[in-house]
Image (cartoon, rainbow, N blue to C red):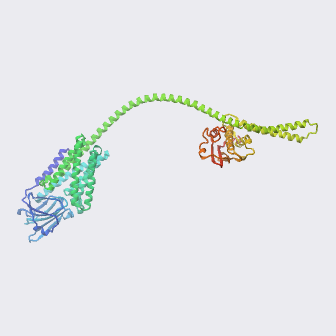
């Protein structure tokens, strides 16, 4: 259904209400009081005549009403119709035929709905035959409007039917818009539709509450809640409108200051809800109205500001919001008595709300088009950027390929240089290790010469003794003496052979790391080489494991390591001392411990002893390469070297090397 047709239906329904109005010669007298009064005192009040038969009062007042109807209308076929639903308390008093002043009815929103003489959202009272004067005692926490009318049964039925039609059209429009937007929300998952559905839901309750239909159909037996619901629903619709409008206009992005000002409404209305729950109904109504006015102004400013900058949704919103505000202003002015009451204007809120709901639904539908256009534009821009990026990437790829080629060539040249450098370093390292070995051997030469001289003396002594025996004129040469002399020669020869063999192994230069190395034999060889330095001064105690496994490596290099460690231990002992040497097997590893009671190493120097060219010895007594080279050798053999030392106590060095795993088919290998 098109928008103009819907508006025509609303105007038609409202027009029927105008046509139902009949000119009535009523006389209305009222007086407002701050405090409650007794019904019996109604005839004695100082009434004032009210023109146009409609009285308007602020909320929280007690109103006394005297209604005079023409004699020809004072029949039981006619009815007093109070066309206003927001009255908490209304009592009807009159004189009966006997002259007694009695209360005939007491009803209102503070009472169960079944206390009303007729089931209407407004208030209908029967007229008694011949009674033309009626008194009313009225109170409400909402603004009080008293549009009294006299109707026959037929005209009353028409009036109520036309009002129900207007409300029915309004409810139908809201429900259609609500379901329509709910379906869109399910498919699009856009939060703005969720907010709008909730807003329409609260708007529906608010309008039906203002016209008394929640009294009639929802809260008939809950008068305490029903009395507060019109004010409460006003606060709720304001809160939901803040969320919807903020999302619809995208205020958080478009205008953050207005967004923050708008959200103050939520805080203020929550305080209004608190006032309602505390039963401060009169104050709560004024507070909620004030907050609604504030929120309406902020919303109007936001719509104008965003419309000026060309934001299309803001133009729809500004139109809908302006129409709704106009209807609210008219409704408020009627309640304040500024505009004379009539049913057409009284229904302006329903018309304004309906038009607003329709326009905003149209705007939300247009939002889909806008989003689709934005999506298409975004996709086109993304495609254009992708094409531009593809061109840039192709150009960059060409440049990168050239740079990669150039860089690869540079890296290859650098690798060649590094390879040459590494080979030179390895050669230098080998030369340094050999030089250090030769330097150590040179230092030991004098002692070794002396050590070899001893077995030579044995050999020379044996030779001399045998020569003397042979030159002797005594022909009786004893074999026992010859054997003793030969034993001297053999002992000297063995001793010299052992020293030369140890020196040969130590001084040998090769890079074969696959030899079977017996560390016990290596230890004994090194002790033999250094015997001249320890004899008579340092006691060497050996605890060597006879079942010690072999280590795969280089015999010469391992001789160099053990010899370096023993030389350092000997050098650390100034006078007399001891060196304990042990070998053990543990977890498939060969462990060698060399412990001395020399002067030890300080904690500061202990962290540096493996650095190349670092030495604690006097100048000329050490190159500082021994331990550094020893560590390199041990690492080549996949082992490790550990030091523990304490000044003036001694030093303990531990070598850990992996045992060679012998194959099962060749256990002796």
Q: Quadrant of residue 159?
A: bottom left
Q: Is residue 274 left or right of residue 500?
A: left
Residue lying farthest front? 619
Q: Position of residue 481 (x, y in %)?
A: 88, 41
Q: How many marks?
A: 0
Q: Residue at coordinates 51% horizontally, 29% vertically from top-left?
A: 410
Does residue 100 sit above or below 145 in this rendering? below
Q: Is residue 57 left or right of residue 619?
A: left
**Does the rendering let one see residue 221?**
no
Question: Closer to the camera, 461 or 299?
Answer: 461
Q: Position of residue 429 (x, y in %)?
A: 62, 34
Q: Is residue 607 left or right of residue 396?
A: right
Image quarter of the N terminus: top left
**Does the rendering let one see residue 105?**
yes
Q: Is residue 399 left or right of residue 523?
A: left
Q: Residue at coordinates 31% horizontally, 46% vertically from top-left?
A: 190
Question: Closer to the camera, 327 or 4?
Answer: 327
Q: Position of residue 229 (x, y in %)?
A: 23, 58
Question: Closer to the camera, 70 or 60?
Answer: 60
Q: Quadrant of residue 530?
A: top right
Image quarter of the C terminus: top right
Q: Quadrant of residue 618?
A: top right
Does residue 607 sit above or below 129 in this rendering? above
């Amino acid at each position: 259904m098109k928008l103009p047709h819907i508006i025509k239906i609303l105007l038609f329904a409202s027009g029927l209400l105008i046509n139902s109005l009949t000119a009535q010669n009523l006389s209305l007298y009222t007086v407002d009081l701050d405090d409650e009064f007794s019904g019996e005192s109604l005839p004695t009040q100082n009434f004032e005549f009210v023109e146009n038969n409609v009285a308007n009062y602020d909320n929280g007042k007690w109103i006394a009403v005297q209604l005079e109807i023409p004699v020809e209308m004072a029949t039981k076929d006619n009815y007093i119709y109070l066309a206003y639903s927001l009255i908490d308390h209304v009592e009807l008093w009159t004189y009966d035929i006997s002259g007694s002043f009695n209360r005939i009815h007491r009803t209102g929103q503070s009472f169960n709905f079944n206390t009303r003489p007729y089931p209407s959202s407004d208030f209908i009272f029967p007229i008694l035959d011949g009674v033309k004067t009626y008194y009313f005692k009225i109170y409400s926490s909402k603004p009080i409007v008293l549009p009294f009318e006299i109707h026959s049964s037929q005209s009353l039925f028409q009036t109520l039917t036309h009002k129900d039609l207007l409300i029915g059209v309004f409810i139908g429009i809201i429900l259609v818009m609500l379901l329509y937007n709910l379906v869109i929300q399910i498919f699009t998952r856009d939060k703005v539709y969720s907010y709008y559905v909730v807003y329409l839901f609260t708007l529906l309750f608010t309008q039906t509450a203002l016209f008394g239909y929640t009294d009639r159909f929802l809260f008939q037996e809950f008068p305490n809640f029903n009395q507060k619901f019109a004010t409460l629903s006003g606060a709720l619709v304001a809160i939901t409108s803040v969320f919807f409008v903020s999302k619809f206009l995208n205020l958080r992005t478009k205008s953050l200051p207005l967004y923050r000002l708008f959200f103050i409404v939520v805080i203020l209305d929550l305080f209004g809800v608190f006032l309602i729950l505390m039963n401060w109904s009169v104050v709560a109504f004024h507070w909620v109205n004030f907050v609604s006015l504030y929120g309406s102004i902020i919303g109007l400013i936001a719509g104008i500001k965003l419309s000026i900058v060309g934001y299309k949704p803001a133009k729809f919103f500004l139109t809908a919001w302006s129409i709704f505000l106009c209807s609210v202003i008219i409704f408020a002015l009627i309640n304040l008595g500024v505009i004379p009451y009539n049913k057409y204007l009284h229904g302006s809120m329903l018309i304004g709300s309906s038009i607003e709901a329709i326009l905003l639904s149209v705007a939300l539908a247009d939002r889909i088009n806008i989003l689709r256009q934005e999506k298409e534009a975004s996709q086109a821009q993304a495609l254009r950027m992708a094409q531009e990026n593809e061109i840039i990437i192709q150009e960059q790829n060409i440049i990168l390929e050239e740079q990669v080629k150039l860089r690869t060539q540079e890296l290859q040249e650098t690798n060649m240089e590094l390879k040459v450098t590494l080979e030179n370093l390895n050669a230098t390292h080998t030369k340094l290790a050999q030089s250090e070995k030769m330097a150590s051997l040179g230092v030991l030469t004098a002692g070794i010469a002396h050590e070899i001289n001893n077995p030579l003396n044995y050999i020379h002594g044996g030779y001399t003794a045998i020569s003397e025996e042979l030159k002797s004129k005594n022909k009786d040469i004893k074999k026992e003496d010859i054997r003793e002399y030969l034993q001297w020669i053999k002992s000297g020869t063995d001793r010299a052979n052992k020293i030369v063999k140890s020196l040969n192994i130590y001084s040998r230069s090769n890079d074969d790391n696959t030899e079977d190395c017996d560390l016990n034999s290596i230890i004994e060889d090194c002790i033999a080489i250094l015997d001249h330095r320890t004899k008579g001064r340092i006691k060497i105690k050996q605890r060597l494991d006879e079942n010690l496994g072999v280590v795969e490596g280089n015999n010469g290099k391992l001789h160099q390591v053990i010899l370096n460690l023993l030389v350092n231990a000997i050098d650390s002992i100034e006078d007399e001392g001891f060196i304990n040497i042990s070998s053990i097997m543990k977890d498939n590893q060969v462990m060698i411990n060399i412990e001395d009671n020399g002067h030890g190493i300080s904690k500061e120097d202990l962290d540096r002893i493996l650095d190349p060219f670092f030495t604690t010895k006097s100048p000329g007594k050490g190159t500082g390469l021994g331990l550094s080279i020893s560590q390199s050798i041990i690492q080549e053999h996949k082992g490790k070297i550990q030091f523990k030392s304490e000044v003036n106590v001694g030093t303990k060095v531990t070598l850990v090397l992996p045992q060679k795993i012998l194959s099962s088919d060749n256990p002796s290998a």
